[in-house]
């Protein structure tokens, strides 16, 4: 199935478009109209002549144009008929927002979904049913019922999720944390578009640098595992798997069998395929952000450069916990640093940058020297704002701006609301460093990248 | 292979420990040296062959976890102890026709590991590796891979358990033969793929004798519902 018309449609029809804020059709129209979508929009509503100043059509057949994407927000009893119309009209793809199918309690919904599946087969991709929709950031398309998804900056991370709620949670946290997105897709009940279809598409998709999957339960995990294996050399895949996977039977005679039941989350299968599994939402977003901004480290040898001693020690502990190596610098780097920093502070890794609060050029010099050290693979750079060091971050940015460092800098730069935010944003936008709110998160993201790289390229 | 086929034809749910090991030995997996006997005289003869100390077990196709049922006596170090142990097992569990006493070398080693195979409804055969012995269920320090495994999968499993340091040099004990351990895991996966009639395998404990793993107990459960 070709997902291009779904993710980059030239024309969009909204079946069930509405002017009434108590209807989802209103919110979908708002999503489409209030952002930068450049294609044509055709609202379908037999009872109105205009919806949001756009002329409506009685039904799809009345539209005298090819339709790439139909967003369907009609009551579920009418869905079958509308989809029939879509097929007749040769619509290229569908986002089916309507709920009340397989996810509902009664049998009726499941049966209805089965009938839709029979009707559509694999002729055109259908995202949903039971989804908020999807957002295609580099196409300016918000095909969801949440216009505010458009506020997240476009970027390189795709979030593909089985849960609408989790998609909202992740997208709004992404916005807050400076993670740019290429897509947010709610797969809903997965009529015929599943994780693997999205992965194959994302692997070929220019702006997507990393794929994040939120998985609850899937019928055939082997298809997902195969897709991860197939694409993992082109695109890193981060998975969060919620809900316990039922593995093997509980009445198993062997210990192996009964232990397998407790191995939730298909973790091992995903790892084996070259993907990476995270345990919580924050680690998921942090790893996506690291991949969006930084080149992965080539090894686990980390230098800790800290504006204050304490955060450096916390970072050191975290590095140890996550399997990162923090060893004293070799002779050359050490003597270079000793020339710059007086002996009153730690100089051999971690480096205490405290004495350089007033000497920004020396601070930048140290970062540059350490970046050049062939025995260092990544830098953890920590700087807590103090009135006296206010010039440090602007100087760091200035000093590294001419060339993106070849090694990743995982930063923990923390300041009051209006200080350094511009610099952090710019540093991230230019790929100079990736900022995290605590030293532990920075270290964990570094370690996560290393593990995932190991999975991706080991074979 | 004949062992599985004939056990299926006999309607067994599982192989005896001895048969399981014979089967595994056919794939080059390291198992204990042992003999299956029905009389004390035979047992004594075996003790000469194997040396002391020994382990005596009831070998039955019906009993899955012998230790829990008191049907294993370890550290049998003299002829008198052998007589006593033989008698004790027979008192506890009078041997039936298809049962016998297993006289086994006692593998000396402090590090006990576990390996296994299950058949998952979605993934098919999956291989387990973990810390074994009595810690297997208590600590649940295990990891799984879907078969087929390659060597790098298997080596990764060894590093993945929380207590992986036990495979290194600890307390004067040598580093485990990781290559061999990994090969055993790969082989288990191949067995799972090639023998549909095998439902589950438990190898617990696999004891490290110095650096070398030895399968000390083995359970092979058969698939009866096909």
Image (spheres, coloured by chain):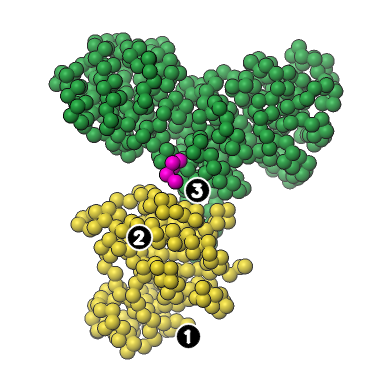
Q: Could you tell me which secondary element the residue under label 2 belongs to?
A: helix
| Residue A46 on the magenta span | no
- Do the CB atoms of the residues marked 1 and 2 lie less than 8 Å apart? no
Q: Is residue B179 above or below residue A412?
A: below
Identify the hue of chain B. yellow
User: In which quadrant of the rendered view does residue B30 lie?
Assistant: bottom left
Question: Within 10 Å of the Cα at label 1, are there few (<14), some (14-19), or many (20+) other Cα atoms?
Answer: few
Q: Which residue is mark 2?
A: B180
Disc assigned to residue A269 = 3
Question: In the displayed structure, does residue A11 sit left or right of residue B59?
Answer: right
Q: Chain of mark 2?
A: B
Q: Which residue is mark 1?
A: B97
Rounded to the nearest whole Å, what is the CA distance between mark 1 and mark 2?
37 Å
Question: In the displayed structure, does residue B84 sit left or right of residue B155?
Answer: left
Say whether mark 2 and mark 3 are on the same chain: no
Q: Which is more foreground, mark 3 or mark 2?
A: 2
Q: Could you tell me which secondary element the residue under label 1 belongs to?
A: loop
Q: Could you tell me which secondary element the residue under label 3 belongs to?
A: helix
| Residue A458 on the magenta span | yes
Question: In the displayed structure, does residue A38 sit left or right of residue A175?
Answer: right
Span colored in magenta: A455-459
Identify the hue of chain A. green
Q: Chain of mark 1?
A: B
Q: Which is more foreground, mark 1 or mark 3?
A: 3
């Amino acid at each position: 199935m070709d997902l291009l018309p779904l993710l980059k449609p030239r024309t969009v029809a909204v079946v069930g478009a509405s002017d009434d804020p108590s209807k989802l059709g209103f919110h979908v129209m708002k999503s489409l109209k209030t952002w930068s979508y450049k294609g044509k929009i055709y609202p379908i509503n037999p009872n109105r002549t205009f919806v949001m100043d756009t002329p409506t059509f009685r039904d799809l057949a009345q539209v005298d144009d090819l339709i790439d994407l139909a967003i369907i927000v009609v009551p579920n009893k009418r869905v079958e008929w509308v989809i029939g119309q879509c097929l007749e009209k040769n619509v290229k793809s569908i986002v089916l927002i309507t709920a009340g199918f397989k996810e509902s309690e009664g049998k009726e919904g499941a049966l209805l979904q089965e009938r839709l599946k029979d009707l559509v087969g694999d002729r055109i991709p259908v995202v949903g049913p039971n989804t908020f929709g999807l957002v295609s950031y580099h196409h300016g398309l918000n095909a969801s019922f949440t216009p505010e998804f458009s506020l997240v900056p476009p970027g390189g991370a795709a979030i593909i999720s089985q849960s609408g709620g989790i998609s909202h949670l992740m997208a709004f946290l992404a916005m807050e944390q400076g993670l740019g997105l290429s897509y947010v897709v709610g797969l809903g009940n997965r009529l015929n578009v599943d994780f693997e279809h999205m992965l194959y598409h994302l692997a070929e998709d220019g702006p997507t640098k990393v794929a994040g999957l939120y998985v609850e339960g899937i019928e055939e995990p082997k298809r997902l595992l195969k897709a991860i294996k197939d694409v993992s050399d082109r695109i890193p895949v981060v998975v969060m798997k919620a809900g316990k996977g039922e593995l093997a039977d509980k009445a198993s005679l062997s210990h192996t069998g009964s232990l397998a039941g407790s191995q939730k989350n298909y973790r091992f299968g995903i790892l084996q395929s070259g993907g990476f599994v995270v345990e919580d939402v924050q680690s998921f977003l942090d790893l996506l952000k690291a991949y969006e901004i930084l080149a992965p480290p080539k090894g686990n040898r980390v230098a800790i450069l800290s504006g204050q001693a304490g955060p450096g020690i916390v970072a050191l502990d975290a590095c140890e916990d996550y399997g990162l190596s923090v060893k004293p610098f070799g002779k050359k780097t050490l003597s270079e640093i000793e020339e710059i920093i007086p002996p009153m502070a730690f100089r051999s890794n971690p480096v205490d940058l405290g004495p350089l609060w007033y000497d920004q050029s020396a601070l930048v010099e140290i970062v540059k020297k350490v970046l050049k050290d062939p025995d260092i693979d990544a830098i953890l750079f920590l700087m807590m704002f103090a009135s006296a060091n206010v010039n440090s971050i602007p100087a760091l940015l200035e000093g590294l701006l001419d060339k993106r460092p070849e090694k990743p800098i995982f930063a923990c730069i923390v300041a009051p609301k209006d200080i350094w935010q511009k610099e952090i944003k710019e540093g991230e936008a230019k790929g100079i460093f990736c900022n995290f709110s605590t030293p532990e998160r920075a270290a964990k993201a570094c370690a996560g990248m290393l593990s995932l790289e190991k999975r991706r390229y080991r074979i | 292979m004949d062992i599985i086929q004939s056990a299926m034809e006999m309607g067994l749910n599982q192989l005896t420990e001895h048969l399981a090991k014979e089967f595994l030995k056919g794939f080059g997996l390291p198992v204990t040296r042992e003999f299956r006997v029905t009389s004390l005289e035979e047992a004594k003869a075996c003790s000469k062959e194997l040396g002391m100390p020994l382990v005596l077990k009831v070998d039955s196709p019906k009993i899955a976890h012998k230790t829990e049922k008191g049907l294993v006596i370890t550290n049998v170090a003299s002829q008198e102890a052998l007589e006593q142990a033989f008698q004790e097992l027979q008192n506890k569990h009078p041997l039936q026709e298809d049962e016998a006493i297993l006289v086994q070398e006692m593998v000396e080693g402090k590090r006990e590991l576990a390996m296994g195979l299950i058949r998952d409804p979605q993934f098919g055969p999956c291989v387990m590796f973990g810390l074994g012995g009595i810690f297997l269920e208590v600590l649940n320090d295990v990891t799984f891979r879907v078969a087929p495994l390659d060597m790098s999968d298997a080596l990764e499993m060894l590093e993945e358990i929380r207590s992986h340091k036990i495979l290194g040099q600890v307390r004067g004990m040598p580093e485990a033969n990781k290559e061999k351990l990994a090969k055993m895991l790969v082989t288990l996966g191949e067995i799972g793929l090639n023998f549909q009639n095998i439902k589950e395998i438990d190898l617990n404990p696999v004891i490290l004798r110095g650096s070398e793993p030895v399968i000390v107990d083995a359970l092979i459960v058969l698939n009866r519902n096909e």
